[in-house]
Amino acid sequence: MELNRRSFLKKALAAGSLAAGTGSLLSACSGIRRSDLPDQTLSEHTLNQLDKLGNSILYYASLAPSGHNSQPWYVRVLSQNEWIIGVDPDRRLPAVDPGNREVMLSIGAFAENLSIAAGTFGLKAEMEVIASDPFEQDVIKVTLRKAKPVDYPLQRITRRMTVKHGYLSNEIKQEDIRALSEHLKERLFYFPRGTDHAACIEEGAIENFRIQVRRDDAQKELVQWVRLSNKEAERHRDGLTLEGMEIRGFKGWFVRNFINPEDFMKPSFRKQSVDQIAKFARQGGGWLVITGEGQTVLDLCDSGRRFERMALKARERNIAIQPMTQYLEEESGLKQIAAEHERRVVPHFVLRVGYLNTYPEPVSLRRPVSWFVRL
Ligand SMILES: Cc1cc2nc3c(=O)[nH]c(=O)nc-3n(C[C@H](O)[C@H](O)[C@H](O)COP(=O)(O)O)c2cc1C
């Protein structure tokens, strides 16, 4: 890597001016985190046509996970009680998700957060999947009706996160698997570390990551969603920040100041990311696989909702979860799964799982509600 003093100084100064511009919250030495940005529930983001309650519900919905944190959703407000959840075509990931499979899962997770949040505020969110193919833009019609408030801790939504580092190798306890399976009856499978199946998933996850990293189109797409500088991150409030990728401390500072998005295309960088993923894949208490009925919009949105229900319960049990999706994105992974399983087995998520000693706080950024609402 070439260290160019002038460009370093320019970048360091740029980072410094951002720090000054955003007050004492940000510093050139740390990456931007969710807590550095204004609270999205504050009224400054309330839209005139969407009441404060609607704004809050959509804020919670927006904390859903999504591939590359692309946040593929929009919400069309038809009236105060009728909304459409749709897919913004500019937020698709055509190189790794050409069939919009993962987009539908993410939309499902968004819908689940929406439904839970509405429930706590005394509104039942009736959901009707209106899209019949995954390329239709309008996907779910939501009708909000008055109901008895549901008791649900919304901190589960605000504190859920995808964790990458620090997985312990202990087997996940039966009682925890039972709790995680509550909304995934007969669809959640746990393969503890040390079993043949877990070893097979581990190797498949690494191998398919390696295959994907060699694909220029997938790598270019990734680069589009990487937010290296705090300034970029703050401007977009989506994508993969260094904090989100858990690249912190000196390494984070170095990457922020010396690495350009184009460096991701270099063979040395690709090799490093395979090594990193292999290290992750070999940590943890094994693998979870969520299967579904099929690959229709309904199947995928339903799975996304159930996955989110499960993910929301992980933190209080000290369990970390990381989707490792390349297995389901690469032809070789899909062929291997098809060859070794019955046809009716349709995996929707492959997830690394493990206990943590310390659970970090969420850092990934979200667009404010006003950025994805269409009136
Ligand atoms: C359908 C889907 C696929 C995902 N695939 C991956 C993946 O392959 N690797 C990974 O590290 N995270 C993956 N994620 C997690 C996202 O990167 C994460 O949700 C996003 O960056 C936001 O961070 P958060 O979950 O901490 O809020 C996936 C999430 C979803 C919903």
Image: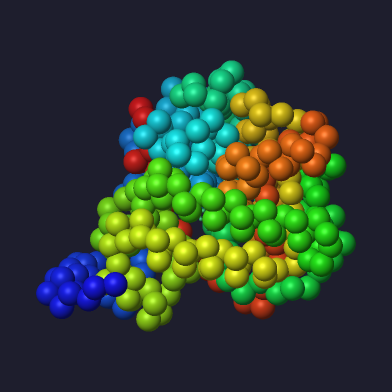
Q: Which corner quadrant of the image does residue 17 belong to?
A: bottom left
Residue 240 spot, x, y in % from top left: 42, 56
Q: Which corner quadrant of the image does residue 171 belong to?
A: bottom right
Is the residue 136 above or below the residue 230 in the image? above
Is the residue 132 above or below the residue 166 in the image? above
Residue 79 appears in the picture as rendered: no
Q: Nearer the viewer, residue 340 or 42?
A: 340
Q: Nearer the viewer, residue 256 or 136?
A: 256
Is the residue 329 above or below the residue 125 in the image? below
Residue 244 spot, x, y in % from top left: 46, 62
The residue depicted at 37 percent of the width and 47 percent of the height is 220
Q: Which corner quadrant of the image does residue 114 belong to?
A: top right
Residue most extreme to the right = 174
Q: How many marks?
A: 0
Residue 329 spot, x, y in % from top left: 58, 42
Is the residue 65 above or below the residue 102 in the image? below
Residue 152 spot, x, y in % from top left: 67, 51
